[in-house]
Amino acid sequence: MIQPPYDSLICRRTVRMLVPMVQIFAVYVLFFGQYGPGGGFVAGVMFAASVVVDLLVFGDREETRQAAERLLASDGVGLLIFAGIGGLCLIGGGAYLDYSGLVIPGLDEAERRHLAILLTQAGVGIDIAIASISIVFSLWRAGETGDEHA
Amino acid sequence: MTYSFELPLLLLLLLTAGAAIVAKDLLSAVLLLGSYSFFLALVWAWLGAVDVAFVEAVVGAGLATVFFLLTLFNAGKGGIRFRKASPPLAALFVLPLLAGLLLYAANDLPQFGDPQAPASVHISPEYLTKAYAETETTNIVTAVLMDYRALDTLVETVVVFTSGIACWLLLRRGSE
């Protein structure tokens, strides 16, 4: 079993500096996935990686645990965004996930598709991030309870 | 020299993959697998598939390694080292035969970068010519993933969602 908090000044300092930068870069990757490499999937995994690094170095703190539990219970919000946009397309008169069916006044068809791609990518990113963090927390907890039984 | 970059990368790939199989304890095998993923990401980037390289680097070298490590640490000291059973003798003959067959079949594949290859003439030209006008998205990979093939991506997202739920149900049972 790992013994966090990891007792190294260099490691803790580096991670404290690195985590916000990785998170900002994840947001950048999400919003610029339409212009360069990247997109929702990578952004979500990246955001999850920053949280996981924090967990590995600083350990499972009690104050963050409560917030994390509440957040992880919302697994599926991203999926709801993605599928919901598909449903909105149906309401607008198009096929499922045919973004030209989104009825947004003032936007022509290409702009609607552009916006819908961005929103669905955000949905994918949220879903992937929460699912990855949830898996890591599950593995972490499994080790803790296993230790108690041993 | 045309292959000055490809050949060392291929060697490193084979080396790390072989070492991950041969390694005596699972911890070093996991770390070798992570470096294998990183070299594979370099290969993807070299071939021009930057999006795939991105995912391979972040997921293969990053997150998957963390999953493996956490599992190993949970398994305790006894789970990290293990005694390997020697492979069956038949594998020694059958696997090289299979490799030879596959290499023979690979001769019939189209050349890399061939514009007349069946994969490049079927629907790719349509995406390449129309994607920007239809979606205002310069990264055509994103346009294909999130618009033209959005249903595939939706189901992939469902798969990830399901894996998260399954891990929760399997690993946290009784902890609440």
Image (tube, grey):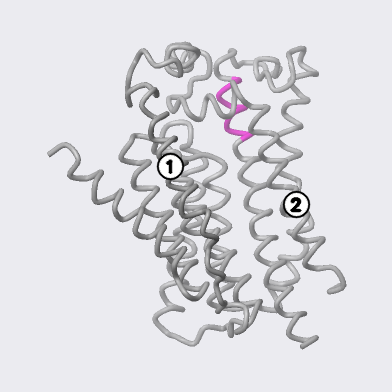
Relative side of A150 to A57, left or right: right
Relative side of B4 to B132, left or right: left
Kind of residue at badge 1:
Ala
Q: Is residue A4 magenta?
A: no
- At 44% from the left and 85% from the top, the residue drawn is A8
User: Crowdedness of circle 1 by 10 Å Cα count: few (<14), some, many (20+)?
Assistant: few
Q: Chain of mark 2?
A: A
Q: Write down the residue under mark 2.
A: A75
User: Crowdedness of circle 2 by 10 Å Cα count: few (<14), some, many (20+)?
Assistant: many
Residue B18 appears at what percent x and percent y?
Answer: 40, 60
In the rendered image, which quarter is residue A41 located in?
top right
Q: Chain of mark 1?
A: B
Q: Is residue A105 above or below residue A12?
A: above
Relative side of B35 to A39, left or right: left
Kind of residue at badge 2:
Asp
In the rendered image, which quarter is residue B22 located in?
bottom left
Where is the C terminus of chain B found, in terms of image quarters? bottom right
- At 44% from the left and 28% from the top, the residue drawn is B139
Residue B136 appears at what percent x and percent y?
Answer: 48, 20
Q: Nearer the viewer, residue B61 or A41?
A: B61
Magenta stretch, main secondary structure, is helix
The circle on residue B132 is none
Q: Write down the residue under mark 1.
A: B99
Q: Report the mark closest to the observer, 1 or 2.
A: 1
- At 72% from the left and 29% from the top, the residue drawn is A85
Which residue range is magenta in the image? A112-120
